[in-house]
Amino acid sequence: MPFGLRKIPFSVQILLGLVLGVALGFLARSNDLSWLTSTLHTVGGLFVQLLKLAVPPLVFTAIVVSVVSLRGVANAARLALKTLLWFGVTALISVGIGIGLGLLTNPGRGVTLDLGGATPPKNTGSWTDFLTGIVPTNPVGAFVEGNVLQIVFLALVVGAAALLVGDAAEPFVALNRSLLEIVQKALWWVIRLAPIGTLGLIGNAVASYGWDLLAPLAKFTTAVYVGCAIVLFVVYPLVLVLAGRLNPLRFFAGAWPAIELAFVSRSSVGTMPVTQRSVERLGVPREYASFAVPFGATTKMDGCAAIYPALAAIFVAQVFGVDLGVTDYLLIAFVSVVGSAATAGLTGAIVMLTLTLSTLGLPLAGAGLLLAIDPILDMIRTATNVAGQALVPTVVAAREGTLDRAAYESAGRRDLTDPEPVADTRPDRQDELSPVPA
């Protein structure tokens, strides 16, 4: 990167990329410059592809090293349970906000759409997807397909086995430690390209979709953005203050690069390496972040799996003239809290929506009505997802007494691209990094 740009803070570089991308996107759309749209699409797509390329080796090696580094399986199990608990608590609050906004705004009332053209999406969710999706048919397939949940499962099993084997597994563990350092160094190079990637991603989004598609569904779109904003800037700060005794401004300062990248990339998995780095910069021990962030990237989706399905289900019911009762709203809440795990092998808001619609007995074709504006909605949904994926490990670490509060307080003042890690995973530091007893 040119020396002049090194003097500019990384977050400002991303913001500049965002502004320039919007300008180029409007230029391409208003002047019908297909070559510029194609260029923006290629630049953004390559950046996300590079990030996703690092995900399988990063997740596997980090979790294996983390599990071996933990002093006892009991500690790991307790952390996992507390992480799941907070996933569920924040998801329940989020779906409650989604239902409340749906009842308040009635997003489907008065909407005139061609119901004859509504067809069910190709991918749908089911309650058996979790069981069939978590265990890979073969280990290589999980890495080739980039199925993060399956890789997490494999890494946890291998890490636990290595922990029990003991000294005989040390060469294997040492290899994973070396690979982890190599992957993180290469990933640092990719993260440096984030401003350019942001430019391409947001520019392509503006050039391809614009805002003209929103007119018929303006009320629904506004409700989704307002719901996500409430969760992002009201619910999450309250959780940080009340549960973690943490300053929300410091959290957003540290997590903002990941949230911003999630907004433009529309991919929790693609953003995952940046999310994990942000969480570590916030003072969460690396061995815990290495588990919680990849797991959250596939199962913690407050935007896609809580707010959006609740609002969309109410929208579809109103468009098709179906009255929902109290039982239906309770089912929406249940699906949102539990269903994100059931669709973890097939992540995506449309898959989650079809699971919700089928559970309520609503026509799956209703999901097809929203496909045209899905990319625009997916921006704020994914940003909310990633913020939640960073929030929960931070709160759990704070409550466990393992959060480096000095690092948390200075997270916004340190550059995300600093290659030096915050957490130290050396065996001789284990006494300092192990969770305190509950």
Image (cartoon, rainbow, N blue to C red):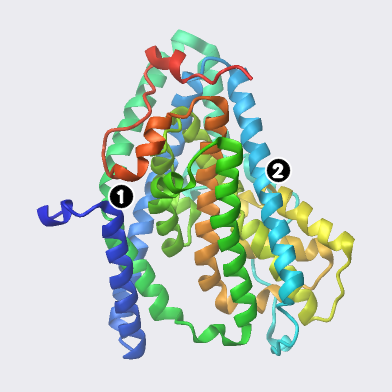
**In the rendering, at what x and y percent does residue 173 appear?**
41, 20
Is 406 above or below relative to 361?
above
- State the residue at coordinates (78%, 59%): 332
The image's mark for residue 191 is 1
| Nearer the observer, 86 or 404 | 404
Q: Could you tell me if residue 414 is visible in this image?
A: yes
- Residue type at mark 2: give it: Leu
**In the rendering, at what x and y percent does residue 109 appear?**
75, 83
Dividing the picture into quarters, in which one does residue 259 lie?
bottom left
Q: Which secondary structure, mark 1? A: helix
The image's mark for residue 124 is none
Is 365 above or below relative to 418?
below
- State the residue at coordinates (63%, 72%): 223
Left or right, 31 with respect to 71, comes to: left
The image's mark for residue 131 is 2
Q: Which secondary structure, mark 2? A: helix
Dividing the picture into quarters, in which one does residue 370 lie?
bottom right
Left or right, 218 with respect to 206, comes to: right
| Nearer the observer, 188 or 174 | 188
Left or right, 56 with respect to 37, comes to: right
